[in-house]
Amino acid sequence: MKKDIKIPEVKNVHVAVVKEEHLEYKTQDWNAYIINNSDKDLETILIVSQGYSDKKMTPPMRHTLAKLPARSYAKIEYLQDKVLELNNEFKITFFEGNQMYDKSYLFRKNTINDKALQTIPLMQLKGVLVK
C-alpha cells in the first residue's frame, strides 16, 4: 500500500531563518519563515518543528496555515538563542491543488549565525536559507 502513494518532489518552497529587529524590545531576534517561491498557491500547510541533539530535544511545535499565496512568505516561529545550538528540523506538508507534498528542512546545529547570513529570495532580508 505504501508504495502506491506518490508524493512528488517539492520545488520552490523553502524555509529561512531571518535575523530581525524587534521594535518593541529593541532586540535582534531569529525568526523562521516559510517561503513559497512558486507560481501556485499552497493550501492547508502543516508545519512541525523541533530542535534536537544527542542529549537534548525540544517539544514539537505545530503550526498551520490555511493558505500561502504564490510568491509570498509567512512567519512560522521565533527561535530562542539556545535552540540555535541544536539541529532544527521543520517538517512541512501542504497541498498544491489536489496534490499533497511533504518535505523536511534541516538547519544543522550552530549553522544559524551571523556569518551565514545571505539575502533571502522574495524577502530582501538577511538570513539563513534551506532549500
Image (cartoon, rainbow, N blue to C red):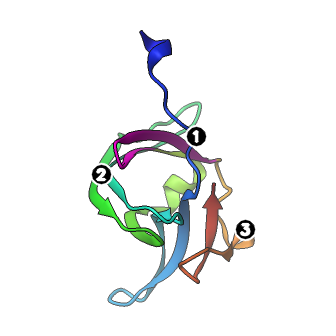
Q: Earlier in the sequence, mark 2 or mark 3?
A: 2
Q: Earlier in the sequence, mark 3 or mark 1?
A: 1
User: Residue 15 in the image: x percent, y percent?
Assistant: 53, 58
Magenta span main SS: strand
Q: Nearer the viewer, mark 2 or mark 1?
A: 1
Q: Is residue 26 left or right of residue 44?
A: right
Q: For the point 54% across and 72% down, which residue is it?
A: 18
The answer to which image quadrant residue 66 occupies is bottom left
User: Residue 86 in the image: x percent, y percent?
Assistant: 57, 46
Decide: few, some or many residues near mark 3? Use Cα within 10 Å; few <14, some 14-19, many ≥20: few
Element carrying mark 1: loop
- Relative depth, front residue between 50 and 81: 50
What residue does disc 3 label?
116
What residue does disc 1 label?
9
Residue stretch rendered in magenta on the structure: 92-107
Give the total number of marks visible in the rendering. 3
- Say if 82 sits above or below 56 in the image: below
- Relative depth, front residue between 11 and 35: 11
Amino acid under disc 3: Ala
Q: CA distance from mark 2 to mark 3?
A: 26 Å
Say if mark 2 contacts mark 3, CB within 8 Å. no
User: Residue 64 in the image: x percent, y percent?
Assistant: 27, 52
Q: Earlier in the sequence, mark 2 or mark 1?
A: 1
Q: CA distance from mark 2 to mark 1?
A: 22 Å
Amino acid under disc 1: Glu
Q: Which mark is residue 63?
A: 2
Q: For the point 62% across and 74% down, which residue is it?
A: 120
Amino acid under disc 2: His
Q: Is residue 62 left or right of residue 30?
A: left
Give the residue at the far right of this rendering. Answer: 115
Q: CA distance from mark 3 to mark 1?
A: 26 Å
